Image: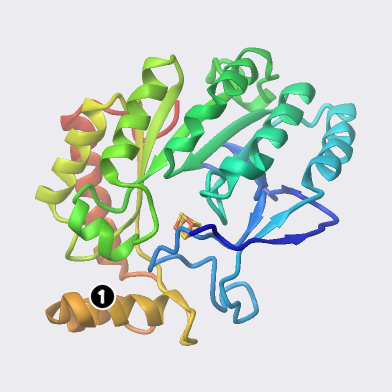
């Protein structure tokens, strides 16, 4: 069935971040779509976190290309080069992108103005755009703060909250299969790109154990990941579309025994306890050493 998508016009599409992102190295972000049809249960971009109780309804920013030309022309004139992150609030390769090609159009504009990109996705549709991404990698002006550290203007990252297909179907019902994601990672690596796996969010008592994480590292290492980034789950809001509500509903249905344990590590906070996060990070670092894989992009 064809996905319904509204068309909206925006005044700005290039968001300037206050600081360069430590994880993704980005100074800017772009989201070609509003909302995300992949519908991950733990996704905090829907619901009330951003000030309103959004009903998930996908929209394409139809005038994004003309707005981006204006915004990048201005930034390039001031030589404010930097990495532009795709994938912070919506996946840039949703099924509708196949026909709409808005992400592709935006990448062509980025190539024209010689900016760099860090593209985070869960979809094999990214393979369609490797031709443009290759050119961006060759032509981009590396931002000053990354000179000598980065030798390419393109980083391709793939997200995983698990590499267990059954678990993924429960928590990421609309996302392409893990096999497809891992195959795509490998194809991007084989095409010569810097590629990484983003384990975000790791699901408490489901995908955060030493054993489960070990398998995730093994899977992404075998498929060519140059680096892995990871973080725990965050849960926001009490409204019907909020990720906290949805996450506990799904947990109650599939893993009721984990509800009290999960509530205990969160308490009243949106993030798990400091102790939990510290232990998770230690496990993660240990596995980076074991698999000889970087815990940052460069
Ligand atoms: S792919 Fe990312 S943005 Fe889309 S629903 Fe999943 S977590 Fe949210």
With 251 as the anchor, is 257 left or right in this view?
left
Residue 228 screen position, x and y as percent: 34, 37
Residue 123 quadrant: top left
Query: Outermost residue, left direction?
Result: 211
218 up-or-down from 15: above or below: above
| Residue 23 seen anywhere in this rendered image of the structure | no
With 190 as the anchor, is 242 left or right in this view?
right
Query: Outermost residue, front direction?
Result: 1
Residue for point 37% across, 23% down = 187
Residue 31 screen position, x and y as percent: 65, 50
With 173 as the anchor, is 164 left or right in this view?
left
* Figure coloring: rainbow
Residue 110 quadrant: top right
| Residue 160 seen anywhere in this rendered image of the structure | yes
Residue 140 quadrant: top right
Residue 138 screen position, x and y as percent: 62, 12
Q: Quadrant of the C terminus?
A: top left
Q: Residues within 10 Å of mark 1 (few under 14, many from 20)?
A: some
Residue for point 18% across, 39% down = 286
Foreground pick, 185 / 261: 185
- The count of marks equals 1
Foreground pick, 196 / 34: 34
Mark 1 CB within 8 Å of ligand 1: no
202 up-or-down from 218: above or below: below
Q: Secondary structure at mark 1?
A: helix
With 75 as the anchor, is 115 left or right in this view?
left
**Residue for badge 1:** 265
């Amino acid at each position: 069935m064809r996905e319904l998508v509204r068309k909206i016009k925006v005044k700005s599409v290039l968001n300037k971040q206050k600081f360069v992102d430590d994880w993704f190295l980005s100074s800017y972000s772009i989201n070609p779509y509003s909302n995300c049809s992949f519908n991950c249960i733990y996704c905090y971009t829907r619901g009330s976190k951003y000030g309103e109780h959004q009903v998930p309804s996908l929209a394409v920013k139809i005038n994004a290309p003309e707005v981006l030309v204006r915004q990048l022309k201005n930034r390039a004139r001031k030589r404010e080069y930097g990495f532009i992150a795709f994938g912070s609030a919506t996946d840039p390769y949703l099924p509708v992108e196949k026909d709409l090609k808005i992400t592709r159009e935006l990448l062509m504009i980025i190539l024209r103005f010689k900016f760099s990109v860090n593209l985070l996705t869960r979809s094999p549709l990214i393979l369609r755009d490797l031709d443009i991404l290759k050119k961006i990698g060759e032509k981009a002006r590396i931002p000053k703060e990354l000179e000598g550290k980065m030798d390419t203007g393109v980083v391709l990252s793939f997200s995983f909250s698990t590499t267990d297909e059954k678990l993924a179907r429960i928590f990421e019902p609309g996302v392409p299969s893990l096999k497809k994601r891992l195959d795509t990672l490998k194809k991007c690596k084989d095409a010569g790109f810097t590629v990484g796996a983003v384990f975000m969010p790791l699901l408490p008592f489901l995908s955060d154990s030493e054993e489960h994480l070990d398998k995730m590292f093994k899977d992404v290492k075998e498929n060519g990941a140059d680096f892995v980034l990871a973080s725990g789950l965050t849960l926001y809001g009490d409204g019907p579309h909020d990720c906290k509500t949805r996450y506990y509903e799904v947990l109650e249905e599939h893993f009721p025994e984990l509800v009290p344990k999960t509530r205990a590590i969160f308490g009243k906070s949106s993030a798990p306890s400091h102790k939990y996060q510290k232990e998770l990070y230690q496990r993660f670092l240990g596995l980076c050493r074991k698999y000889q894989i970087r815990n940052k992009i460069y």
